[in-house]
Image (cartoon, coloured by chain):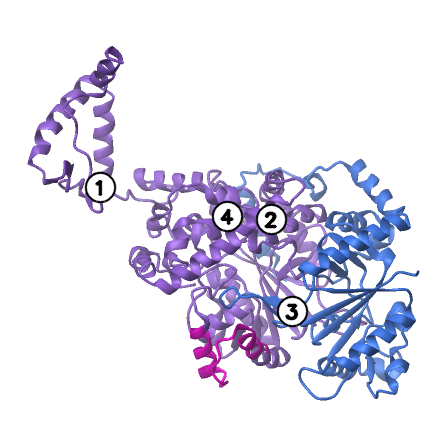
């Protein structure tokens, strides 16, 4: 690492800003001073939402999802979600090959769906974006990673959960963790996300409040990749005509498990 | 370095105005996006106030850039990424080449980045035998056609669907079609193979977060996510001003950016990327490199008159409302940055004399300031640049654009500050205008050096009755 480049560069910046030689300031001092009380208050509000309030957020989400072409499907429990996903698998055809397969995250909510069993009789394999932890696998991580990559590329549907969903903009927020690959939500032609009602937030501000005040979120950080997804991939680069499915998924389905 | 053709501004502008297809495309774009942005702002609970807040956030970052850059670099390294500081285009490009050589890169896939246009990255990589594929659909089209982008976020706005259809049938060997969904599908297929084969992913950086050590990327197509996840190396290029202090700042900025850029409430994909794949994760690049670039920006930072332009988040909203851009299109500006923002940034980066037509060509209507999500006072800076051209400026190495013009204005200013000389001048002008060609009571042509005024229009002759006399007469006989 060449720190002399960095020092010279930053010194030029300091000079340009007219800093005096002894000038010191820290990042903390620079943070745009917003009232801490206000964000604490909002944090409490998010944490103590009643189920009626959550239902309201859900209606807002459903409303907003139309603008971004996101399909929101609300169901009572995991079983009805997997039945519905099985329906999608039956109805939708693969874009690139002829064989149907899925890749899913390793996630408690997804495990509850028992997709492998549900789709077994249709002969549709469900792969998991998870590294095995036995000895040989650890020795040969690369081969295993290539294997998973291949599965994702071959899959026409990717199944994930999400950390949050923002009602105001119909935005899924997902961090990156072991077993929860980044490719699953971008490479397959169809992206299915499954969340619970309590994961819905009001707006972007609430998300940033949680990331900064919630002890769990704070200690985990943003991870090495935190992605926001609002609907399917789209472009308007040819004569400003809107087309869905530029490079990412052409369709996105969001299942919300409402629990009643 | 990118090619600079700012000297051809007038010729290119004339050409653009005569191109009816381009004229249609540009007005179409402005009707949709320009007006759309203004509408989208209206739906914000804070209304236009939010733009002022965004300005403060960005200005706060710019004025503390030294601290922010240092924290950013520390935090990116803590996350396992590499950081380089490049003073100019050449050193930025050579850092990238070195990384490419180390990994024996054959193919690189790229997300859209104006900065890489500025530093001429593609040409250098290609010269080193690396295939560089632009993956934003518009950029891809422009690259296939061997052209340059003509808009910051809609790079191929100057091309018709028919032209694109012809281009694709030649280059992608598909049957001719001019149907946008079919053309998009063809590009999707061709680029998918590139994504899967590429060994390097290149992206820009929208706004990095100093507090956490992440860069952010924004796209609707998903090409940046593919480019930054599939290849084994990710190299991100960042203009040194594209950073904010902390997570708190994004709420405001990311609510404004998609509205300004595309009249959307939210972009389809926004990613915070900090560092390479961890050992226990299944995908993502093995290495992450961030190249932070000056290339003339500290000079802008040092001048308080122009420092504000560094707040720019390259949303292109100002292009979408500018009456000059609407007529002359992006190519006339002769550098990757066009429209109002380009008319300020380009002269500051490539030389004020060299790019003088850009700031002289804009008409100071103020539409750009009204729509700018970070409320940059572009008209004020255009005036500042013009003042430098009129008087010359040592710091910016500006020579006076026209001595004759300066002399004329000096004389004029002296003349009108003295009642007696002014009256005498009017008298003289009144008598001598009789020798000028006239038609229908109007003067057709003025002699040099004033002939520019009558190049495209006739002007009224000077009246024998002065304003004062007239006022008196009207007051006496109401
Ligand atoms: S000057 Fe303002 S409106 Fe223009 S591109 Fe920059 S941020 Fe957008």
Mark 3 Cβ inside 8 Å of ligand 1: no
Chain letter, purple in picture: B
**Circles 2 and 4 on the same subunit:** yes
Residue B17: x %, y % from top left: 33, 58
Q: Residues within 10 Å of mark 1 (few under 14, many from 20)?
A: some
Q: Is residue A130 in view?
A: no
Do pointers 3 and 4 mark residues of a single chain?
yes
- Left or right: B373 as drawn, with respect to A170: left
Mark 2 or mark 1, which is nearer the start of the sequence? 2
Q: What label does residue B40 carry, if any?
A: 2
Q: Chain of mark 3?
A: B
Nearer-N-terminus badge (1/4): 4
Residue at the extreme top: B476
Q: Quadrant of residue A108?
A: bottom right
The tag earlier along the polypeptide, 2 or 4, is 2
Question: Label 3, on which residue?
Answer: B228
Residue designated by label 4: B298
* Mark 3–mark 1 distance (CA, rounded to whole Å): 54 Å
Residue picked out by circle 1: B453
Q: Chain of mark 1?
A: B
């Amino acid at each position: 690492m060449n720190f002399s480049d960095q020092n010279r560069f930053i010194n030029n910046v300091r000079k340009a800003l007219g800093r005096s030689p002894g000038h010191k300031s820290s990042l903390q001092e620079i943070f745009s001073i917003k009232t801490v009380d206000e964000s604490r208050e909002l944090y409490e509000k998010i944490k103590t939402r009643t189920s009626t309030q959550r239902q309201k957020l859900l209606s807002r989400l459903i409303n907003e999802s139309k603008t971004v072409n996101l399909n929101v499907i609300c169901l009572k429990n995991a079983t009805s979600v997997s039945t519905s996903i099985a329906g999608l698998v039956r109805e939708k055809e693969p874009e690139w090959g002829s064989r149907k397969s899925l890749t899913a995250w390793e996630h408690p909510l997804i495990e509850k769906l028992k997709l492998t069993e549900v789709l077994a009789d249709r002969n549709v394999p469900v792969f998991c974006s998870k590294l095995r932890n036995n000895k040989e696998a650890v020795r040969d991580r690369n081969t295993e990673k290539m294997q998973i990559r291949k599965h994702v590329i071959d899959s026409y549907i990717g199944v994930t959960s999400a950390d949050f969903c923002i009602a105001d903009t119909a935005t899924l927020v997902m961090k990156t963790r072991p077993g929860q690959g980044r490719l699953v939500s971008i490479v397959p032609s169809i992206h299915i996300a499954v969340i619970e009602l309590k994961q819905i937030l009001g707006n972007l501000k609430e998300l940033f409040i949680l990331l900064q005040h919630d002890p769990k979120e704070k200690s985990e950080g943003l991870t090495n990749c935190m992605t926001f997804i609002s609907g399917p991939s789209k472009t308007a680069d040819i004569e400003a005509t809107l087309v869905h499915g530029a490079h990412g998924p052409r369709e996105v389905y969001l299942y919300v498990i409402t629990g009643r | 370095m990118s090619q600079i053709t700012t000297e051809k501004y007038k010729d290119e502008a004339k050409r653009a105005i005569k191109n009816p297809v381009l004229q249609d495309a540009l007005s179409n774009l402005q009707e949709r996006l320009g007006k759309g942005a203004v509408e989208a702002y209206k739906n914000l609970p804070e209304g236009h106030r939010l733009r002022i807040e965004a300005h403060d956030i960005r200005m706060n970052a710019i004025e503390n850039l030294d601290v922010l850059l240092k924290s950013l670099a520390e935090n990116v390294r803590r996350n396992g990424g590499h950081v380089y500081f490049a003073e100019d285009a050449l050193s930025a490009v050579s850092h990238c080449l070195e990384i490419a050589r180390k990994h024996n890169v054959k193919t690189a896939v790229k997300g859209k980045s104006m900065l890489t246009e500025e530093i001429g990255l593609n040409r250098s990589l290609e010269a080193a035998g690396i295939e560089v594929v632009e993956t934003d659909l518009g950029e891809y089209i422009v690259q296939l056609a061997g052209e340059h982008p003509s808009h910051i976020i809609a790079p191929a706005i100057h091309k018709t669907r028919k032209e694109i259809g012809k281009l694709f049938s030649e280059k992608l060997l598909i049957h001719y079609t001019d149907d946008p969904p079919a053309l998009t599908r063809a590009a999707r297929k061709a680029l998918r193979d590139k994504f899967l084969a590429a060994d390097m992913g290149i992206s820009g950086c929208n706004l990095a977060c100093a507090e956490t050590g992440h860069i952010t990327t924004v796209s609707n197509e998903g090409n940046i996510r593919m480019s930054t996840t599939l290849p084994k190396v990710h190299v991100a290029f960042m203009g040194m001003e594209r950073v904010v202090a902390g997570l708190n700042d994004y709420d405001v900025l990311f609510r404004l950016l998609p509205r300004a850029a595309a009249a959307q409430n939210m972009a389809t994909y926004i990613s915070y990327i900090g560092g390479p794949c961890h050992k226990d994760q299944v995908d993502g690049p093995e290495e992450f490199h961030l190249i932070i670039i000056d290339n003339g920006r500290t000079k802008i930072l040092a001048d308080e008159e122009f420092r504000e332009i560094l707040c720019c988040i390259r949303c292109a909203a100002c292009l979408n409302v500018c009456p000059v851009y609407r007529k002359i299109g992006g190519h006339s500006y002769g550098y990757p940055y066009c429209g109002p923002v380009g008319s300020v940034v380009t002269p500051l980066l490539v030389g004020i004399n060299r790019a003088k037509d850009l700031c002289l060509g804009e008409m100071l209507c103020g539409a750009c300031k009204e729509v700018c999500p970070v409320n940059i006072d572009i008209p004020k800076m255009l005036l500042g640049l013009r003042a430098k051209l009129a008087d010359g400026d040592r710091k910016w190495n500006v020579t006076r654009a026209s001595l004759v013009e300066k002399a004329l204005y000096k004389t004029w200013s002296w003349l009108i500050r003295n009642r007696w000389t002014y009256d005498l001048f009017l008298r003289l002008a009144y008598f001598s205008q009789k020798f000028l060609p006239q038609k229908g009571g109007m003067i057709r042509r003025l002699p040099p050096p004033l002939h520019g005024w009558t190049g495209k229009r006739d002007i009224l002759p000077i009246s024998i009755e002065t304003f004062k006399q007239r006022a008196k007469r009207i007051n006496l006989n109401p």
